[in-house]
Image (cartoon, helix red, strand yellow):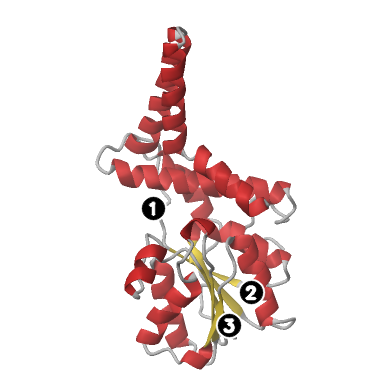
Amino acid sequence: MFYAISKVFWLLAQPVSLAFLFGLGALVLAVAGRRRSGLALGVLGLLILGVASFTNVGAVAIAPLEARFARPAELPERVDAIVLLGGATAARVSTARQVTETSEAGDRLIETIWLAQRYLEARIVLTGGVAAVLAGAESEAVTMQRLLLAFGIAPERVVLEGEARNTDENAEYTKALLGPAPGNVLLVTSAFHMPRSMGLFRKVGISAIAWPTDYRSTGTERFEFDVAEPIANLLTSSVAMKEWIGLVVYHWTGRIDDMLPGQASN
């Protein structure tokens, strides 16, 4: 139920959806003769779309998330498991063409391959299932495995977890795979997604070492207009909004202990 509600909520709450819904509401109000209310709603929708697309508000909002965890100053001497969270591939294209087509978060896969080559004894856990809206697609774990094998990673090292549909399930199902004594675990995911991921993995008893990647900000942004890449700005705004909402909801529902987990959290 939580998964379904979260998907429907985000479908309606993301900036482009809000702008569309407010615009639609403005049209309905205008037809009903409430032009002033319709105008106000339409302006609000345009404001949301304009700020998300033509300013760097997304980068400003995402930067604090990306700053919560840093990579280790020194590489661990030993790593027993490398856990890669799904979200790095394009499911439909990858399934149809039987390739590994990466998404904006493809850095996750690159870093995991590098780590796998650095820690030759570590198991590589690929966790990611199939979204309900993509019926007929292969699990993301299978898609990610295809690229690792192509880079010469021994298949016996790769552990697939192909049922998880969100980060909550990533943590739960990975815990079941690793058992009560997982050893030293490296957790690979996007930097903006690391606080929520670490909070969830800590909640199930895995004290992982964060390995953030896929940065979307420089970390030094100040709010300003940015008309060069409106589509990229809109995407970053949507990602930041989704992650902040996710943190609030996961903390409110008891799925993570801290509202904004960080490096020094216990």
* Residue at x-position 38% and y-position 79%: 147
Q: Name the residue under label 3.
A: 81
Residue 114 left/right relative to 5: left
Residue 168 left/right relative to 94: right
- Quadrant of the image occupied by residue 80: bottom right
The disc label shown at residue 174, or none: 2
Task: Please tell me how crowded label 2 is: few (under 14), some (14-19), or many (20+) other residues with Cα within 10 Å.
Answer: many
Label 1: which secondary element: loop
Q: Mark 1 points at which residue?
A: 218
Task: Please tell me how crowded label 1 is: few (under 14), some (14-19), or many (20+) other residues with Cα within 10 Å.
Answer: few
Look at the picture and state if 38 lies above or below 165.
above
Mark sitting earlier along the chain (3/1): 3
Q: Which of marks 1 and 2 is in front?
A: 2
Residue 30 or 81: which is nearer the viewer? 30
> Can residue 120 be seen from the camera position used here?
no
Look at the picture and state if 263 lies above or below 61.
below
> Looking at the picture, how far across and down is residue 138, in whole percent?
46, 71
> Can residue 47 be seen from the camera position used here?
yes
Q: Identify the amino acid type marked 1.
A: Thr
